[in-house]
Amino acid sequence: MRNNSPFLKLTFEYLDIPDNMYQGSLTVEKRRDRKYQVEFRNVSFKYPGSDNWALRNVNIKFEIGKRLAVVGMNGSGKTTFIKLLCRLYDPTEGEILLNGIDIRKYNYREYMDIFSVVFQDFQLLSLKLGENVAGKIDYDKELVTECLEKAGFSARLAEMKNGTDTYLYKDYDTKDGVDVSGGEAQKIAMARALYKDAPFIILDEPTAALDPIAEAEIYGRFDEIAGDKTAIYISHRLSSCKFCDEIAVFHEGAVIQQGSHASLVADTNGKYYELWNAQAQYYTA
Ligand code: ADP
């Protein structure tokens, strides 16, 4: 007890950090038609302890059921935009509205329920594949399998003799536990987002760890994967965003252009045109 208590102290200090997040009480309307509308109204944000604006005066509204692509160079604020949307942080200035109401007024847990996000730094655990997809011990095997198939994992799944009960990694099953590649891990993370079946699905640079073939496979199927959900797709590769209904171009923390691929690429003075041409050389050949 004596020897171990110094280590426990750190844990307890961590658990004692007060939760200062403002907790609203409004319930999020569970809409069958999934008609949710989101608006950023003059949103600016600085990370705690930082003097720089990560986002500055962002105004954007998006239509539900559509595919929104968020593009821009590294550091332009794309991930921050998603973190604010998911309430990992609250805006420093301005407000984010869901169906016309400031998101801080909603019950936090209920608000989280409408988003499925695959962040770049997602984690898989050394547990069963099915548990990783469902995020719980009791999971619906059929649904897990279906989600893995949609995410393009079926061939790999077929090779696993214990199916969805296969342990990931060797920590708890040194004999039959499997190691997965970066691309496979990303597919499992996507299956996890699908299993949650939330009205919004957000993929943050989902293909960062995928090879070009796996990437093309996921882009090609993304529309089908997203189904009737509102999908937000973040990427610095513009070729992956062409199929989206609406594209928002971020630059130095601001949304500088918004529109369809055709309209953006037609504006030869715009940032999109510049980025598109800079990247096109890699694809046309
Ligand atoms: P993107 O997703 O477009 O690459 P980010 O949203 O990650 O861009 O970053 C936007 C800006 O915020 C960058 O200048 C980045 O350095 C800064 N930033 C990101 N995360 C943090 C953090 N945790 N603390 C401080 N600054 C951050």
Image: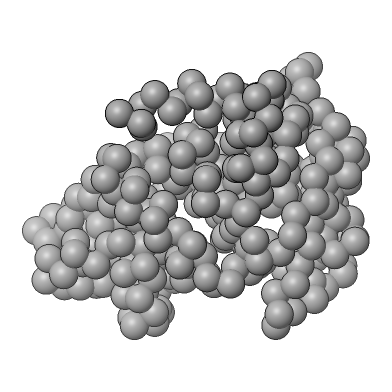
x then y, percent, for residue 262: 61, 42
Q: Which quadrant does the N terminus fall into? A: top left
Viewer can see residue 5:
no
Q: Nearer the viewer, residue 103 or 226?
A: 226
Of residues 235 and 103, which is closer to you in this image? Answer: 235
Horizontal side of 213 relative to 86 (left or right) equals left
What residue lies at 31% left-to-right and 75% top-to-bottom? 145
Q: Quadrant of residue 35?
A: bottom right
Residue 216 at least partly seen: yes
Query: For the image shown, how many numbered marks are present on the structure?
Result: 0
Between 159 and 174, the residue placed more toward the observer is 159
Residue 101 location in percent, x, y? 90, 61
Q: Residue furthest left?
A: 175
Query: x and y percent of residue 213 in the render?
Result: 26, 45
Location of residue 143 with respect to 248 vertically, above or below: below
Instruction: Tell me what residue is drawn at x 60 percent, y 42 percent.
Output: 261
Quadrant location, the C terminus: top left
Residue 4 lies left or right of residue 90; in this view the side is left
Who's the residue at 80% across and 45% down the image?
Answer: 60
Horizontal side of residue 218 vs 69, given as left or right? left
Residue farthest along the top direction in this orientation: 51
Quarter location, residue 104? bottom right
Which sits in the foreground, 173 or 117?
117
Colour convention: one colour
Q: With respect to residue 145, does 11 lie above or below?
A: above
Asked if residue 223 is positioned above or below residue 92 in the image, the reply reads below
Q: Is residue 153 left or right of residue 7?
A: left
Q: Position of residue 52 (x, y in %)?
A: 76, 18
At a point 43% along the width and 28% down the height, the residue shown is 280
